[in-house]
Image (cartoon, grey):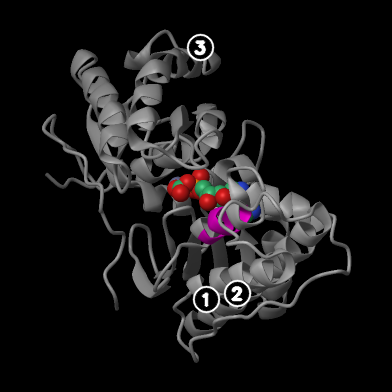
């Protein structure tokens, strides 16, 4: 069913996100204003295994979904989930068992309160995090044409947006996602999981003692590759401390900091350079960053400089809205709702859902 609806200032969505290892529920007004956003992170749980075990993640979602829902409703000052206009939910991509927990919650609420259900692509959520505002905050919405870089644990790609919900794929990783590279290199250096924040912290201790690591430019294409960089880190660790580099236990802190800094320099350089090139080619007025790696301080700073040079506006959500959350699903869900999209109660999880097809 498609039925365009005029933008309604007070329209409220309750949004549920459970695609990976954060159990999250948010209430978002008019696709922008965050009335409440509650995230229960399983990071501590997965730190023990150094990565996500899908069965463990799904069980944790089951354990936390109802408390997180109740907390979001209470913080938004609502009576119950019937006080919203629609329910939005992530239906992919992600871990099947984890997605199913959020889907079941969202469908139950939609059925119980007789509210429309809106299916949201998690990757679209990461982009629409750039539209979110805190209570009391004022900021212009991103202008089109925009170029969006999504860099998360599972995805790395660049898209052009000439309008809402319209994506042209400009480039993507040909191997590891940027976040995955941070996590794998973190492990090689003996840093705690997840690797991204740990590498950023370790790099701060390196000062000017940074190891030079390679950059995979792939000609003038807007694709990315990070697996060669990971191999270069592995070789450097083996050359310096011997062993196989698989447990990272033997890497001294000072060396880990130097390599972490060099690795981060390389990733930031490639991401910022290619995003700026994409923005230039598309004549973008706005550059939007999203996904967990967009929480990275040096990437945010480098992107800010490139955007200023191009005369484009950089929109990057605050760090906790870059990593997985429900508010971004509410922001993207609002646009889908306005476009008249409604999902049935037979909505199923789509673990391999894509955002855009190659141009
Ligand atoms: O978007 P996200 O929360 O989950 C996915 O959809 O994958 O992204 C998680 C990824 C992890 O790989 C994590 O290491 C990375 O984001 N990350 C960071 C930082 N914070 C999180 N990477 C670099 N620097 C950070 N500060
Ligand atoms: Zn994500």
Left/right placement of residue 128 relative to residue 135 reads: left
Q: Residues within 10 Å of mark 1 (few under 14, many from 20)?
A: some
Residue 143 image position (x, y, % from top left): 52, 63
Labels 3, 1: front one:
1
Element marked by disc 2: helix
The yes-or-no answer for disc 1 within 8 Å of ligand 1 is: no
Q: Which mark is residue 228?
A: 1
Q: Can you say which quadrant of the picture contains the N terminus?
A: top left
Question: What segment carries the magenta color?
Answer: 181-186
Residue 125 image position (x, y, % from top left): 41, 47
Q: Name the residue rendered at 55%, 16% in the picture.
A: 75
Q: Name the residue rendered at 86%, 69% in the picture.
A: 209
Contact between marks 2 and 1 (CB within 8 A): the answer is: yes
Q: Main secondary structure of the magenta part?
A: helix
Mark pair 2, 3: CA separation: 49 Å
Mark before the other along the chain sequence, 2 or 3: 3
């Amino acid at each position: 069913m498609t039925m365009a609806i005029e933008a309604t200032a007070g329209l409220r969505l309750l949004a549920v996100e459970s695609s990976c290892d954060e159990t999250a529920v948010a209430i978002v007004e008019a696709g922008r204003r965050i009335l409440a956003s509650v995230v229960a992170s399983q990071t501590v749980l997965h730190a023990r295994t150094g990565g996500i075990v899908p069965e463990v993640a799904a069980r944790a979602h089951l354990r936390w979904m109802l408390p997180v829902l109740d907390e979001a409703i209470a913080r938004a000052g609502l009576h119950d989930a019937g006080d919203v206009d629609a329910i939005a939910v992530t239906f992919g991509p992600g871990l099947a068992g984890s997605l199913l927990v959020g889907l079941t919650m969202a469908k139950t609420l939609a059925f119980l309160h007789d509210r429309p259900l809106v299916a949201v692509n998690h990757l679209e959520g990461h982009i629409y995090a750039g539209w979110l505002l805190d209570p009391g905050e004022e900021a212009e919405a991103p202008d089109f044409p925009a170029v969006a870089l999504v860099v998360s644990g599972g995805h790395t790609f660049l898209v052009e947006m000439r309008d809402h919900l319209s994506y042209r794929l400009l480039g993507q990783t040909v191997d590891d996602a940027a976040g995955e590279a941070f996590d794998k290199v973190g492990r090689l250096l003996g840093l705690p999981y997840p690797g991204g924040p740990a590498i950023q912290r370790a790099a701060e201790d390196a000062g000017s003692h940074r190891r030079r690591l390679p950059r995979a430019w792939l000609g003038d294409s807007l694709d990315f590759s990070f697996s060669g960089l990971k191999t270069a880190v592995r070789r450097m660790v083996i050359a310096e401390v011997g062993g196989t580099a698989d447990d990272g236990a033997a890497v001294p802190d000072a060396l880990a900091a130097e390599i972490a800094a060099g690795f981060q320099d390389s990733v930031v350089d490639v991401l910022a350079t290619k995003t700026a090139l994409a923005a230039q080619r598309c004549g973008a007025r706005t550059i939007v960053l999203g996904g967990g790696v967009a929480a990275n301080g040096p990437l945010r700073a480098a992107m800010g400089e490139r955007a200023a040079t191009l005369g484009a506006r950089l929109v990057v959500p605050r760090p906790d809205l870059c990593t997985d959350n429900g508010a971004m699903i509410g922001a993207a869900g609002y646009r889908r709702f306005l476009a008249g999209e409604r999902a049935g109660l037979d909505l199923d999880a789509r673990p391999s859902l894509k955002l855009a097809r190659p141009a």
